[in-house]
Each structure stands twice: as C-alpha cells, then as structure tokens.
Amino acid sequence: MTGHRPPSDDSTTDVVRWAAFSCVVVPVVLVWYGTSLAGATGTALGLAAVTAVCRILLRQSERGAARLHAEEREPRRGRHHRSGAGARRGGRHTGGTTPGG
C-alpha cells in the first residue's frame, strides 16, 4: 500500500467526493423533474460554494488537530511547562501567618 493516508484524511476525502457528486446529481435531478435550467445551475453553484467552504474548514480542522497532536507528543521543557511535585519551589506563599512565628 503505497501512499497510505491516515483514516481522518480518507474520511475527509470521502465527504468531499460525496459533496462533489451531489453538486452534479442534484441539478440533473432538478432539471429532470421540471426545474428551469437557470434554477438548476444556481443550485449547482450554491452547492459547489458550500462544498468548497466545507472542504477548507475540514482541512483547517485537520491541520489544527495534527498540530495539537504533535504538541501533546513532544516533551514539555522550559520553566513554564514544569510539572510534578517540585514544580513550584520558592517564591511567595499566600498562606496565613502565625503570630510570633
């Protein structure tokens, strides 16, 4: 299997293919049932526009998810990403004060 894509990419491609298929089939069915050619063409253009916008949004979502996944996999470093029991040492404590202590 050369060029195998991740499952999410396959599902996005399938959604876009079905949407493109409907952009062709819906106007044909509308003309078949008596809608004017201008109305069917307008419907086709509207479906194509919605399909294009959805495709863009799906791709952005995939890139964002991939970026988030990559950030989760890399180790946390630096002073702002410490975790664990001794992560915060020193500094001011906001606890109450005891008299004479």
Image (cartoon, rainbow, N blue to C red):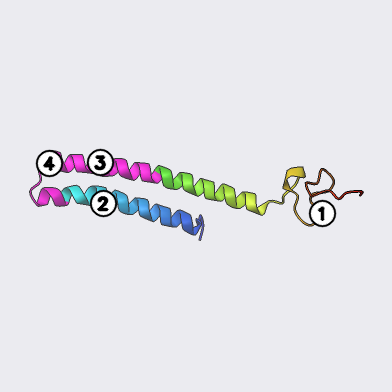
Distance from the alpha carbon under mark 3 to that under mark 2: 11 Å
Query: Could you tell me which secondary element the residue under label 2 belongs to?
Result: helix
Sequence-first disc among 1 and 4: 4
Residue 12 shown left or right of residue 82 in the figure: left
Badge 1 amino acid: Gly
- The label on residue 62 is none
Magenta stretch in the rendered image: 29-55
Q: Residues within 10 Å of mark 2 (few under 14, many from 20)?
A: some
Query: Could you tell me which secondary element the residue under label 4 belongs to?
Result: helix
> Pointer 3 and pointer 1: residues touching (CB < 8 Å)?
no
Residue tagged 4 = 37
> Pointer 2 and pointer 4: residues touching (CB < 8 Å)?
no
Residue tagged 1 = 86
**Residue most toward the bottom?**
1
Where residue 94 sits: x, y (%)?
78, 46
Report the mark closest to the observer, 1 or 4.
1
Residue 12 shown left or right of residue 25 in the figure: right
Report the mark closest to the observer, 4 or 3.
3
Residue tagged 2 = 22
